[in-house]
Image (spheres, rainbow, N blue to C red):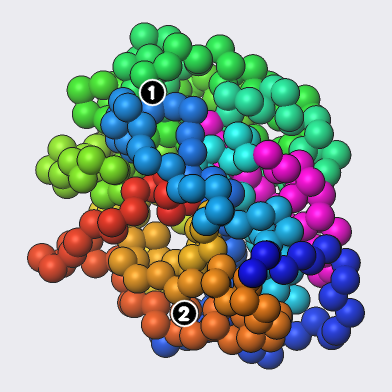
Amino acid sequence: MPPVRWRAGTYSGPVTYDRRLVDGFGRVATDLRVSLTDRCNLRCTYCMPAEGLEWLPDERLLSNDEVVRLVAVAVNHLGVEEVRFTGGEPLVRRGLVDIVRRCAELRPRPDLSLTTNGMGLSRLAESLATAGLDRVNVSLDTVREDTFLALTRRDRLHDVVAGLAAADTAGIRPVKVNAVLMRGVNDDQAPELLRWCLKRGYELRFIEQMPLDAQHGWRRDTMVTAAEIFASLETEFELEPAEEPRGSAPAELFDVDGGAGTVGVIASVTRPFCGDCDRVRLTADGQVRNCLFAREESDLRLALRAGASDVEIADRWRAAVVTKRAGHGIDDVSFLQPARPMSAIGG
């Protein structure tokens, strides 16, 4: 049967938070990551092969109406407060601006953010700001053109830089930059990248490389660790832990040189924060993943297209989150990398 059409603003029932997304360890998921596509216009070496991947067929992808309806179920029935749109590369998703606008019309209004490679951001930043986007995270691992080309297999650094500037001009602040350091490629560039971000008022976050590449070539012994990142930064900067509590945020924040700015480190592998995790993920084809590293998924798309009510969908979602494990288990000898790569899961 065809997809059930739904429009934002048609939900008239009471907002309920008494049956939230609570897992078996008492953690409550209030942060929803929504992947809008598995497609990407870069070919980052730590994510996918040069030839790309076999993309999901269009009929399996959630429609714009279906994305907005599931976000509304999460907000109105499950207590979700933050929604982050991811990919693949979400800027290549047709209808992105309309999805953001319709989600911004939900009440209670969720905080809306976007994780992107930034290549198309200069074209869409103003429209996204007008639609209601609150924040943006742009992936940028280097500010050197030759290193950017080596890492992404695309000569497009200038487009990413322009996208960051456009987001700042459009008032989508704070502008955050996500960087992954690769040994022998850009692991000597951490201070340079931090200087570049501080000069422009961007907030930099270094992320340990995670075992989510399509090639399954990740090795812990070659990964640049948080300890190495700190050591590199401290050759040029004085870092002090930021005063604000970290809470469930993935990044440990540090004040730079007594207040020149902040820098964060997301050490998912060596300093995991699973005990405070408040995130749940929805893939572009409508699968619930209760952990980035989960190997199990729960299908909402089929139920949605079979005519399930919002209440029924919410019940399925709760059941999926109840089974969330205590941690990602990367250090366990039994750990197996997820079958789906990051581009298909959504960060």
> Tag 2: Cα neighbours inside 10 Å, few (<14), some, or many (≥20)?
many
Disc 2 marks which residue?
A: 320
Is 228 situated left or right of 190 in this image?
Answer: left
The residue that appears at 39% across and 47% down in the rendered structure is 342
Q: Nearer the viewer, residue 214 or 173?
A: 214
Q: Which residue is drawn at the image coordinates 53% and 38% (left, top)?
A: 89
Please name the residue shown 58% across and 16% down the image. Answer: 159
Are there few (<14), some (14-19), or many (20+) residues within 10 Å of tag 1? Answer: many
Residue 67 horizontal/vertical position (percent):
67, 59
Left or right: where 300 falls relative to 94: left
Magenta stretch?
A: 94-117
The reply to whether the magenta stretch includes residue 346 is: no
Which part of the image, by quadrant, shows the N terminus?
bottom right
How far is mark 2 from mark 1, CA to CA?
35 Å
In the rendered image, residue 99 lying in the magenta stretch gets the answer: yes
x and y percent of residue 141 in the render? 41, 27
Q: Is residue 230 visible?
A: no
Where does residue 290 sit, x and y in percent of width and height?
A: 44, 70
Q: Which mark is residue 152?
A: 1
Q: Is residue 25 above or below residue 238?
A: below
Residue 223 lies in quadrant:
top left
Question: Which is nearer the N-term, disc 2 or disc 1?
Answer: 1
Q: Give the structural element (helix, strand or loop) at label 1.
A: helix
Q: Is 293 above or below relative to 181?
A: below
Kindly identify the amino acid type of the residue bearing the numbered disc 1. Thr
Residue at image location 70% in from the left, 53% down from the top = 64
The amino acid pointed to by label 2 is Ala
Determine whether the residue tagged by mark 2 lies in a helix, strand or loop. Answer: helix
Q: Position of residue 156 (x, y in %)?
A: 50, 15
